[in-house]
Image (cartoon, helix red, strand yellow):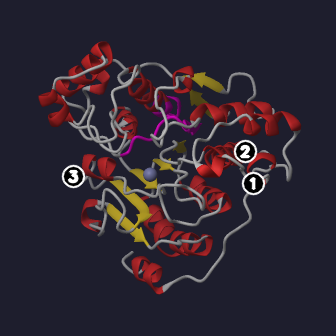
């Protein structure tokens, strides 16, 4: 099976307004960039189905799902429900697709699991709401699509599953969902001290591995952690399937975090992980600079398909990036390489003791 790319036109709806961090093009910008590069062969792009309320109920409380549906229908929610469910609270705004958009991501995640049931690779950049809780919205995440996708693998009979989360924020919702299942390893590399401030320690007996890394985390440090800790932990599990959340907010230049990876570091990590299981889903996750996100995740698609990344982008691909609207100061005069290249300059550096100490736990 050729790799599949799952997306949806629903991600194009401008439901978030500046200064909300998600008021930038994301999943479908990746699709457009790959398309402009001629990287989507016929049949590779797959439209995401909408998960049913019953499917969402496999992880979420029925009353919470009903409240989310009501929030979209009425574009409002009574104060008591806002407080209880955090829908229309914090930065989890009520918007015109507040039910359909996360239900589409959940449907895409579950489809990704089904498509890879007998082996294969799927990239689903619209999937990745790793903070979602059974009965609470959290961190812009209304539905935990990742958990629902991994549960679909389990429903298909898979047991030994690895979740690898390189997003700058701790994958707390996924960790909690599988904390009682030692057959599912959840591994999260995230910035220490950053929201949600969990993920400070590993619990190997429960299959929970956390690497809270210091600000400035560089390419050499990620490669060191992969070689010395993360890959050995994954190999020991002999996983039947791997769900990777690359994120794009650990990249240097993301406005919400202080990690300093180049996109090559994430591509290299993925290349090392890919041979370790017959089934791989690469989701999306955070990432709030659309240029960095689109370049990183399009490069992931190239890697999954064995496509060569050009040193400078052809005009059609460059136009896709030139048309991006990015409301932050960095978007007023974006550097040329954000628009005419895909590959970042590598960002090597010393492997600090704080990182080595994290590695020694494995
Ligand atoms: Zn994040």
Magenta segment boundaries in residue numbering: 112-130
Q: How many marks?
A: 3
Q: Quadrant of the C terminus?
A: bottom left
Residue 9: image x %, image y %?
A: 57, 21
Q: Nearer the viewer, mark 2 or mark 1?
A: 1
307 relative to 10 in the view: left or right: right
238 relative to 89 in the view: left or right: right
Query: In the current view of this chain or complex, which residue is farthest to the bottom?
Result: 353
Q: Is residue 324 inside the magenta stretch?
A: no
Q: Which mark is residue 180?
A: 3
| 98 relative to 119, above or below | above
Going from N to C along the chain, the mark reached first, 3 or 1, is: 3
Q: Which mark is residue 335?
A: 1
Secondary-structure class at tag 3: loop
Residue 206: image x %, image y %?
A: 25, 60
4 relative to 286 in the view: left or right: right
Q: How crowded is the residue under tag 3: few (<14 C-alpha within 10 Å), some, or many (20+)?
A: few
Q: CA distance from mark 3 to mark 1?
A: 46 Å
Q: Quadrant of the N terminus?
A: top right
Going from N to C along the chain, the mark reached first, 2 or 3, is: 3
| 49 relative to 251, above or below | above
Going from N to C along the chain, the mark reached first, 2 or 1, is: 2
Secondary-structure class at tag 2: helix
Foreground: 121 or 13?
Answer: 13
Q: Nearer the viewer, mark 3 or mark 1?
A: 1
Query: In the current view of this chain or complex, which residue is farthest to the top?
Result: 73
Q: CA distance from mark 2 to mark 3?
A: 36 Å
Ligand 1 within 8 angstroms of badge 2 C-beta: no
Location of mark 2 (residue): 302
Q: Please give the name of the residue rendered at 63% of the width and 79% of the height, measured from the top-left corner.
A: 349
Q: Nearer the viewer, mark 2 or mark 3?
A: 2
């Amino acid at each position: 099976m050729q790799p599949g790319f799952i997306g949806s036109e629903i991600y194009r709806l401008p439901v978030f307004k500046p200064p909300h961090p998600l008021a930038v093009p994301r999943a479908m910008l990746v699709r457009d960039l790959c398309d402009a590069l001629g990287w989507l062969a016929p049949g590779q792009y797959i439209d995401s189905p909408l998960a049913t309320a019953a499917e969402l109920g496999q992880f979420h409380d029925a009353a919470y799902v009903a409240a989310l549906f009501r929030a979209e229908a009425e574009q409002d929610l009574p104060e008591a429900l806002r407080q209880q469910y955090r829908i229309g609270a914090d930065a989890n705004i009520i918007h015109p697709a507040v039910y359909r958009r996360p239900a589409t991501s959940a449907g895409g995640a579950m489809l990704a699991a089904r498509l890879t049931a007998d082996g294969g690779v799927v990239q689903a950049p619209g999937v990745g709401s790793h903070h979602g809780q059974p009965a609470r919205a959290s961190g812009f995440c209304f539905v935990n699509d990742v958990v629902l996708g991994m549960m679909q693998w389990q429903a298909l009979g898979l047991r030994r599953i690895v979740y690898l989360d390189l997003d700058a924020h701790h994958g707390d919702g996924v960790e909690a969902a599988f904390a009682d299942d030692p057959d599912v390893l959840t591994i999260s590399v995230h910035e220490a001290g950053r929201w949600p401030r969990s993920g400070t320690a590993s619990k190997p007996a429960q299959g929970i591995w956390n690497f809270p890394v210091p600000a400035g985390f560089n390419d050499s440090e990620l490669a060191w952690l992969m070689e010395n800790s993360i890959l050995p932990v994954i190999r020991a599990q002999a996983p039947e399937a791997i769900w990777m959340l690359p994120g794009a907010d650990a990249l240097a230049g993301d406005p919400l975090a202080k990690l300093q990876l180049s996109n090559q570091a994430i591509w290299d990590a993925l290349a090392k992980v890919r041979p370790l299981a017959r089934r791989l889903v690469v989701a999306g996750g955070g990432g709030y600079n659309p240029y960095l996100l689109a370049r990183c995740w399009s490069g992931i698609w190239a890697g999954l398909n064995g496509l060569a990344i050009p040193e400078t982008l052809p005009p059609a691909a460059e136009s896709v990036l030139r048309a991006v609207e990015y409301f932050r100061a960095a978007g007023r005069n974006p550097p040329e390489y954000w628009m005419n290249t895909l590959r970042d300059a590598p960002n090597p550096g010393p492997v600090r003791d704080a990182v080595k100490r994290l590695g020694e736990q494995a």
